[in-house]
Amino acid sequence: MKNTKVLAWTILVILALVWGSSFIMIKRGLEVYSAGEVGALRILAACIFLLPVSLPQLKKLSSKHLKLLFGMGLLGSFIPAFLFAIGQTQLDSGITGVMNGLTPIFVLIVGSIFFKQRFDKTMYLGVFLAFLGTTILLTAGGGGLSGFNYYAIFIVLATMCYGLNLNFIKYYLADLSAVVITGVSILLVGPLAAVYLFVGTDFTEKLASTPGALDALGYVSLLGVLSTSIALILFNRLVQITTPVFTSMVTYLIPIVAMAWGLIDGETLTAGQIGGMGAILLGVFITNRKKKKA
């Protein structure tokens, strides 16, 4: 029992560090590569790393499973990878890390609307606070017209994709393990990322001639291997050995790590941004708390 607790806390800390650090790695990649190149590189790195897991599973899966997994790959990995990179071209990594906390909000909303999950009335307060915080961040300065930072919308759309994806996995792919879902879904969208990267961009030219390109490639490759591959496997293990209450703690630790990296990297926060992020975290806390009680 003691060893299980130690393992659970170790995995939780590792997940918080890995996922919380993913936003600074995106930032480093964007110093050389475009948002599209960063997104494609992230998926391709994860795809290559997971090949030993995913390839043996292809023959074992039905055509129905493969179609669903392709859709999950688009919704849960491919599209969000591009959206996060685009959003972070005009958003600080710390702010993006906090906005990532909207994912459980969308898991709840999608589950309530499309899958008739129970929606406690108090959760409306949590949802309201989360989106109030997002609205504050949208208008707290940055790119866009009259201070309206529309790039935050890309992050909202990415977390919406995650919310849809997690519900679809729960209701349509519950018979598959998380490792198989992760590996095969990324394998199926990996070729799309490769075609876009090597045909639709000047990635190879940048890699050969741009100073710092190799370092940036290393950061994004690490992002794909750690955040998109290993972290999901660890998260699945954490779900198996702990409770949902304990597992959900990672939701609150990720923004702390992301903000810490941002501050270390010289990012600054305005009072409005701090207020917006606080409202998001409070909203997530309320919805998670009521969901656990229900």
Image: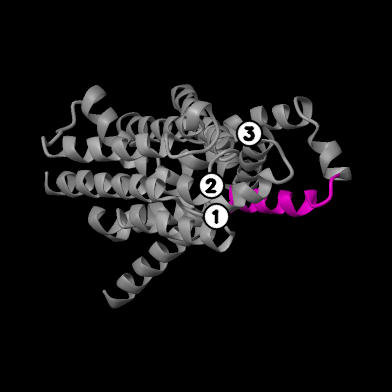
- Which segment did they paint magenta? 210-226
The answer to whether residue 29 is seen in the rendering is: yes
Inspect the image, locate mark 2, and give the three-letter code of the amino acid beneath it. Asp
Q: Residues within 10 Å of mark 3 (few under 14, many from 20)?
A: many
* Quadrant location, the N terminus: bottom left
Image coords of residue 31 (percent x, y) = 70, 46
Secondary structure under tag 3 reads helix
Q: Residue at x 21, y 41 (%)?
A: 126
Task: Give the distance between the C-alpha atoms of the residues marked 1 and 2, in whole angstroms.
Answer: 7 Å
Magenta stretch: helix, strand or loop mostly: helix
Q: In the picture, residue 123 is in which quadrant?
A: top left
Residue holding disc 3: 190
Q: Tag 2 or tag 3, which sits nearer the N-term?
A: 2
Front tag of 3 and 2: 2
Front residue (pair 72, 279)? 279
Place of residue 4 in the rendered image (x, y in percent of width and height, measured from the top left): 32, 70
| Residue marked by disc 1 | 267
Quickly name the residue at label 2.
92
The amino acid beneath tag 1 is: Glu
Is residue 243 rendered to the left or right of residue 272?
A: left
